[in-house]
Image (cartoon, rainbow, N blue to C red):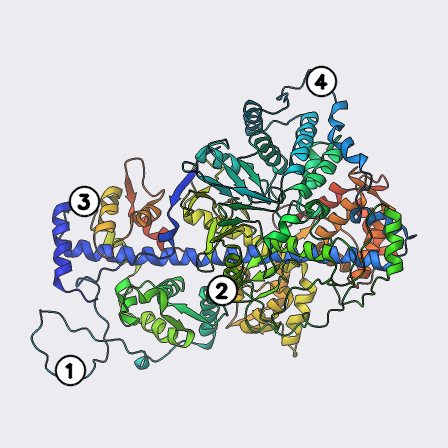
């Protein structure tokens, strides 16, 4: 590679052409100097971006594990409380569907009784919906206006009717002129959908689209996105294809914000809307196949994936992927939960666990949070329970329950993630689906005569990512997913040659484009704040961990021990030493004053002053779960629960996480949260209690 | 809806960063190295300076244990191997060294990697033990370029001597001379730096770049 004088001669010639006022040699030296500093600058930004990314992803995955734990908590309740118990009644409704068939038709026509007053200035949709109607809808939402509940329900009703006649797998073909556009997760980011339409054009007969699931949750405009997508589906049923994602699931929605969004926007009719959506979600098709060669599915595959099976399942029976269709024997988990020391950092991007988990075939497992002994259902109990709900078919109680087999396939399609190594192992982080390797990709694609798998489900910094020798393509369409500037979104254009072309974008709310440095800084600040909050809620565990490394009570630990202790408590798999300058303000000769550090972390506090601070941490750690529980308990979606219900819930949660709580403490807590002292707790009051207040800037809140 | 940042990307070229190599004989001074034993007399070749080969075994590691722990953490961040084997590609080496605060030229990176071929950059790997001497060597480099050097470098283009350089001229220089930058790299560097007349106050510019 050595280049002697020849190259520099070339450069000198170039200099002449440029007509520089300086000697060429000096100009070149100057250029090289600037260039090397530039490359350093870019590399420094990149490592910060990577760290930030790691932080967001690991906190997100930790949060998802929370969701699974929550679900297991409910299962635990179902197993341990008698039918007469009032606690069980609080939550049993999420496990059962309304068995009356007639109720379905009712819901489709429930809009008819709703009147639209003259003061309503939004669009008055007529059905069958036309292109005019749906473009009016897009305009309405672009201008942040609301669609009247009547039309919402009518549109949803029409959608439900249409979806029921669609097959489980959409089959699409690219004709000679048509390119298909494939979009990934949108998660309520209306700006991104509008940006895609702006850049790529609206869906039509000439412009077919596939939307690959996760339309809702997290973002603020999930309902608007649904209405737009369903609108286009109604107008162009042969050219718009929707795949179900793992967030098209009413239980997941309780936790991740969609339920809240609907109830907030439609206070009177929200409940009806949610009920209809619950049906619609389970009628969404599961996958799309393009030209018999490209499989598009939200999560992915497993080694058991069989499209013929998927094609013939009764997909609408699986209302929530988190809930198996019938009760199976609960196995005792004796293997995976060994909490050995983390020797290598778990990298979120590949999600390989460094614990000694032998690769195992996917098993139906019901994982209890604390490894509590779980009893198995007897057939008697099963029949009794089914007797309560009515007309469900009786299953033979064997391990080879066909329904369960089908259910596994669906969960795999909606929840799985690819991994770099060969094999197929249970997806522990998500709690459902699996991790599948390149060998499984080859085998499954080969078996079905396919050449490419397009999936979504994971946020990627560039909006897309190839893996498994470019046989798997992840596409993610919600830009700025974690934070403004965190990632781009992308969509795929697929022509008859079936070569995917990726188009990237980033929705930006500010008029001026953020420079790379600014967007890295912004996102980084946000990530660090989230991380500090996580550290704060684990204060007592952190102190205990540090003290183990500090037997002489000097108050100091080495950097290495600091990193090790922090990881053992938070278990986020983060590069603590790289983050250390941002988290710990000062060190003395390689030692961290951990007491001081903990004090610094508590500069932010929840907006709640109660006398018993010991339960504060527990409560803060579990507040998302508590919110979800409240929403479930609040069966009439009124937005508030009684103090008595609050007490019961809190006690149940505490017994499950094995924490001691006195009745007095709970009452104290309840009184604190009931800000307006009316004997009931408003869910918003509850959330307000957990808003972190930065005491360092504002006036101190005194007792 | 505000400013939209749109970009069409052909994914097939994205995974490989085009090597931006330009080993100019005008590059900063070579490092002093123990020269290899003189070779046997060769047949006359076209005039070419004899460049010594980097030998990692000759490098004494002077890092502290704490520093090494820090490097290990950062190294792990770059490790993309399926089984967390603590290995990075040759192509990542330069990025890592720079991420840790050094600012070598591409030529220096290629030198310490033993002047690999372009196709090796993505395939050959370094483990942590092999990385340390590479990093140490670069850390010991004499002429790293200080703030003043950097400002002087830019002052070269300050025709009017008023503390500013023409953005357009700088762009051209960076894209055509030295270890050329790509257009998008130049764009990123200069983003929001030029005033309404297209001029850049270079002292502020340097402070900005060095502050990361």
Q: What percent of the width, then of the height, locates residue A205?
A: 49, 31
| Disc 1 secondary structure class | loop
Residue B24, labelled with which disc?
Answer: none
| Disc 3 secondary structure class | loop
How far is the residue under mark 4 from the one under mark 3? 71 Å
Residue A398 is left or right of residue A561, and the answer is right
Camera-side mark, 2 or 4: 4
Residue on which the image places disc 1: B39
| Disc 2 secondary structure class | helix
Tell me which label, 2 or 4, sits earlier in the chain. 4
Residue B198 is left or right of residue A616, and the answer is left
Do callouts 4 and 3 mark residues in contact (Cβ within 8 Å)? no
The answer to whether marks 2 and 4 sit on the same chain is yes
Do callouts 1 and 4 mark residues in contact (Cβ within 8 Å)? no
Camera-side mark, 2 or 3: 2
Q: Residue at x 38, y 78 (%)?
A: B62
Seen from this angle, which residue lies furthest left? B44
Camera-side mark, 4 or 3: 4
Residue on which the image places disc 3: B159
**On what subunit does the disc labeled 4 rest?**
A
| Residue placed most toward the observer, A111 or B106 | A111
Q: What percent of the width, then of the height, locates residue A538?
A: 67, 62
Q: Residue at x 73, y 41 (%)?
A: A684
How far is the residue under mark 2 from the one under mark 1? 45 Å
Residue on which the image places disc 4: A117
| Residue placed most toward the observer, B10 or A295 | A295
Residue on which the image places disc 2: A578
Residue A690 is left or right of residue A397, and the answer is left
Mark 2 Cα shell of 10 Å, populated few (<14), some (14-19), many (≥20): many
């Amino acid at each position: 590679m050595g280049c002697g004088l020849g190259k520099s001669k070339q450069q000198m010639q170039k200099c002449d052409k440029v007509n520089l006022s300086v000697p060429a040699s000096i100009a070149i030296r100057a250029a090289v100097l600037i260039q090397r500093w530039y490359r350093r600058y870019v590399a420094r930004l990149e490592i910060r971006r990577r760290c930030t990314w790691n932080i967001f992803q690991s906190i997100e995955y930790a949060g998802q594990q929370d969701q699974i734990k929550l679900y297991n908590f409910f299962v635990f309740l179902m197993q341990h409380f008698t039918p007469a118990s009032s606690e069980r009644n609080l939550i049993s409704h999420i496990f059962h569907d309304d068995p009356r068939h007639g109720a379905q038709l009712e819901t489709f026509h429930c809009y008819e009784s709703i009147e639209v007053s003259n003061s309503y200035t939004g669009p008055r949709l007529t059905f069958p919906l036309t292109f005019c109607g749906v473009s009016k809808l897009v305009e309405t939402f672009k201008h942040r206006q609301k669609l009247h509940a009547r039309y919402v329900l009518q549109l949803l009703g029409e959608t439900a009717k249409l979806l029921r006649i669609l097959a489980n797998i959409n089959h699409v073909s690219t004709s000679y002129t048509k390119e298909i556009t494939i979009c990934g997760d949108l998660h309520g980011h209306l700006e991104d959908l509008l940006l895609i339409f702006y850049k790529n054009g609206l869906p039509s007969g000439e412009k077919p689209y596939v939307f690959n699931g996760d339309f809702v949750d997290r973002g603020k405009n999930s309902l608007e996105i649904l209405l737009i997508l369903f609108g286009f589906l109604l107008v162009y049923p042969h050219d718009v294809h929707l795949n179900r994602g793992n967030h098209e699931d009413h239980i997941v929605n309780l936790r991740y914000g969609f339920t809240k969004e609907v109830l907030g926007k439609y206070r009177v009719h929200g409940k009806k809307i949610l009920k209809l959506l619950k049906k619609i979600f389970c009628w969404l098709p599961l996958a799309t196949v393009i030209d018999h060669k490209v499989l598009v599915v939200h999560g992915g595959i497993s080694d058991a994936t069989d499209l013929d099976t998927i094609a013939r399942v009764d997909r609408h029976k699986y209302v929530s992927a988190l809930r198996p269709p019938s009760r199976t024997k609960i196995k005792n988990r004796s293997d995976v939960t060994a909490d050995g020391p983390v020797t290598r950092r778990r990298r979120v991007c590949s999600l390989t666990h460094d614990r000694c988990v032998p690769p195992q075939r996917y098993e139906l497992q019901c994982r209890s949070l604390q490894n509590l002994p779980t009893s198995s259902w007897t057939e008697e109990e099963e029949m009794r329970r089914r007797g309560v709900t009515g007309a469900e078919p009786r299953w033979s109680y064997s391990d080879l329950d066909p329904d369960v087999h089908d259910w596994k396939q669906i969960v795999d399609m909606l929840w799985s993630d690819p991994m770099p190594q060969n094999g197929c192992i249970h997806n522990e982080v998500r709690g459902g689906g699996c991790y599948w390797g390149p060998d499984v990709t080859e085998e499954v694609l080969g078996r079905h005569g396919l050449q490419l798998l397009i999936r979504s489900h994971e946020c990627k910094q560039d909006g897309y990512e190839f893996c498994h020798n470019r046989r798997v393509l992840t596409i993610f369409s919600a830009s700025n997913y974690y934070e403004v500037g965190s990632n781009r979104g992308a969509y795929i254009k697929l022509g008859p040659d079936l070569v995917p072309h990726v188009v990237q974008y980033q929705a930006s709310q500010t008029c001026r484009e953020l420079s790379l440095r600014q967007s890295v800084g912004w996102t980084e600040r946000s990530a660090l704040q989230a991380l500090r909050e996580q550290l704060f809620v684990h204060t007592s565990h952190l102190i205990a961990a540090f003290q183990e490394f500090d037997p002489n009570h000097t108050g100091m630990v080495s950097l290495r021990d600091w990193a090790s202790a922090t990881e053992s408590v938070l278990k986020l798999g983060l590069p603590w030493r790289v983050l250390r300058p941002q988290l710990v303000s000062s060190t003395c000769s390689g030692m961290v004053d951990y007491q001081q550090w903990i004090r610094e972390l508590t500069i932010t506090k929840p907006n709640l002053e109660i006398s018993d601070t010991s339960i504060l941490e527990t409560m803060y750690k579990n507040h998302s779960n508590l919110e979800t529980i409240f929403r479930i308990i609040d069966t009439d979606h009124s937005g508030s629960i009684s103090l008595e219900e609050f007490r019961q819930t809190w006690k149940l949660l505490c017994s499950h996480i094995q924490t001691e709580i006195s009745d007095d403490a709970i009452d104290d807590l309840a009184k604190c949260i009931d800000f307006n002292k009316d004997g009931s707790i408003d869910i918003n009051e509850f959330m307000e209690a957990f808003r972190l207040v930065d005491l360092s800037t504002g006036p101190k809140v005194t007792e | 809806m505000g400013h939209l940042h749109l970009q069409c990307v052909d994914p097939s070229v994205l995974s490989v960063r085009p090597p931006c190599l330009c080993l100019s004989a005008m590059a900063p001074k070579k490092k002093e190295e123990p020269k290899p034993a003189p070779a046997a007399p060769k047949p006359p070749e076209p005039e070419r300076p004899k460049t010594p080969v980097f030998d990692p075994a000759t490098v004494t590691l002077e890092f502290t244990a704490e520093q090494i722990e820090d490097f290990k953490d950062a190294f792990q961040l770059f490790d993309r191997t399926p089984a967390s084997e603590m290995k990075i590609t040759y192509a990542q080496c330069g990025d890592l060294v720079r991420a840790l605060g050094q600012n070598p030229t591409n030529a220096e990176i290629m030198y310490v990697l033993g002047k690999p071929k372009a196709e090796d950059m993505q395939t050959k790997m370094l483990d942590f033990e092999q990385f340390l001497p590479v990093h140490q060597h670069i850390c010991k480099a004499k002429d790293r370029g200080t703030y003043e050097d950097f400002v002087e470098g830019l002052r070269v283009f300050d025709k009017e001597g008023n503390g500013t350089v023409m953005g357009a001229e700088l762009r051209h220089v960076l894209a055509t001379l030295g270890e050329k930058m790509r257009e998008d790299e130049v764009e990123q560097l200069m983003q929001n730096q030029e005033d309404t007349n297209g001029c850049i106050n270079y002292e502020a510019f340097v402070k900005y770049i060095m502050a990361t």
